[in-house]
Amino acid sequence: MAEFEPKIVAFVCNWCTYAGADLTGTSRIKYAPNVRMIRLPCTGRIDFMLLLKAFDQGADGIIVSGCHPGDCHYTAGNFHARRRWIIFRQLLDFIGIDARRIHFAWISAAEGAKFAQFVNSVTAEIKKLGPYQSYQKAIGAGIE
Amino acid sequence: MMDELRKKAKELLLAGAVKVVIGYGKGSGKKARPLFARRPEQADKLIFDGSCQQNLAVYLTKPELKALGRPAIVAALPAMRAILQLAMENQVAEGLLVVIGLSPEGKLIELPDFKAMEDYLAGAALELTAEQKAKLEKIEKMSPEERRQYWQDQFAKCIKCYACRAACPMCYCASCLVECNQPQWVPAPSHAIGNLQWHVIRAMHLAGRCVDCGDCERACPAGIPLSLLNQKLAAEVFKNFKARAGLSAKQEYALGVFKPEDKENFIK
C-alpha cells in the first residue's frame, strides 16, 4: 500500500506567510505537496471555527501562520490571535482534540526557507501520527 | 430576612422608583421560579432560600423585560458578577437598574451603585470549591484518548435544545452563530460533530466572560457538565492573562485586549 499522505490545511495571513510561501516558490525551494493554503487577510481573522471546519472536511493536520509579533499589517491582529490561540489550545486539549495536529508559526515574507522547512516538519509529524481517525469516525457516525 | 427583602421591594414599587422587581417566587415542589413583581402587593410573594439558584441577570437583556421599564433585581453573588460583566459589555447601565444585593445567608446588602458592588465582590471568595477543583483535575489527569471518549459520551447526550444558551446571562446576542446557515457553522441535527462544535463555540465565546453561575449546567436537561468547560477556560484566562470576568464594570475583555509580552510556548 502506498504511504499515507496527510491532508494539511494551512491558514495563512496575506501579508507575511502567504508572501513568504511565494518566496519559497520563486526561490525554487521544494516542500511537501500535502499542504493546501487558505489565504486570509490577517491571523486575527482566523476564527477558531475555521480550524474545526478544516477537520470536518477531512484534514489530518492544520497549520496556522502569520506575521511575527510587532510586524502585523494591521498593527495588532496577531497579538489578538495569539491570546485566542492560547485559550483555544487549552480547550482543545481539555476536550480531547489532538493539539499535536494544529501547528502555529510566525513566518515573515522574507522567510521562504523557514516556510518550506516548517511545512516539511509538520508533514513529517502528521505522517507519524497517521490519519485523524477518531475525528473522521465521529463525522461518519450519523445522527445520535 | 425575607421580610427585609419584601419590604425593600415594596418600597421601590410604591415609590415608583422601579416598574418591576425581578426576584424568586415559590415554584412547584421544592423549586423556586423567577417572579416579576410589578405591583407592590406582589412583592409579598418574593422568597429567598437555598432553592433560589437561578441567575436572574439573564432577564435584564430581554426585550420583553426592557419594555416594562426600570427594573430592580434580586442579586446574589453570581448575579452581581453578571450585572458588572453586562455593564462592562454596555448591555446595562448604572442608574438604569436597582440592584437588591443579598448575601449567601439572605441578608440585604446596600448596593447604591456599581462601585459598591465592585467593593463587595473584591472581598468575596471567587476560587472554585475543593469539590469543583477535584472534578476538573480528574479530567485533566485523564489521557487524551480518555478525555476524548469522556466528552464524546457527554456530548452524545446533547439534544441541541440550547437551554444552556437561553439560561446564560452572557448569551444575549440577538442572532446567534448557531442559527447562521450560510455558512452552516454548526450542523443543525444532534450529531457527534455538530454537538462537539456547539460546545466548543459556547465555551470559547464565554471564555473570559463567564461568571460561573452554573445556570447552563442546571438548565441542561441532558445533564452535561458544562460548568467544567467554563471553569477550565476561566482558570486558563486567569492563569495566562490575570483576568477574571465580572469584577468591575470598567475592566477589559481578556480576549479583546493583548499585551506584547503575552507568553506562549507553541508558536514556532
Image: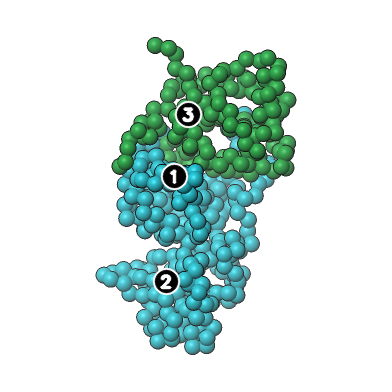
Chain colours: A green, B cyan
Q: Label 3 amino acid? A: Ala
Q: Chain of mark 3?
A: A
Number of residues whose C-alpha sits closer than 10 Å to that of mark 3, classed few (under 14), some (14–19) or many (20 or more): many
Q: Which residue is mark 1?
A: B186
User: What residue sits 63% from the left and 56% below the top?
Assistant: B252
For disc 2, the marked residue is B105
The secondary element bearing badge 3 is classed as: loop
Residue A120 lies, in percent from the top left, at 57, 19
Look at the numbered disc 1 and give the secondary structure of its residue: loop
Which mark identifies residue A59?
Answer: 3
Could you tell me residue B247's position as x and y percent? 57, 61
Residue A29 coordinates in the image, percent (x, y): 66, 15
Q: Give me the residue at 71% from left, 42% from top.
A: A74
CB within 8 Å, label 3 to label 1: no
Q: Residue at x 60, y 63 (%)?
A: B90
Q: Quarter holding the C terminus of chain A?
A: top left
| Of the pair A125 and A24, the residue shown nearer to us | A24
Q: Is residue B242 above or below residue A97?
A: below
Q: Is residue A25 visible?
A: yes
On the rendered image, what quadrant is the N terminus of chain A found in? top left
As drawn, the residue found furthest toward the front would be B182
Q: CA distance from mark 2 to mark 3?
A: 53 Å
Per the model, the C-alpha gap separating discs 1 and 2 is 42 Å
Mark 1 residue type: Val
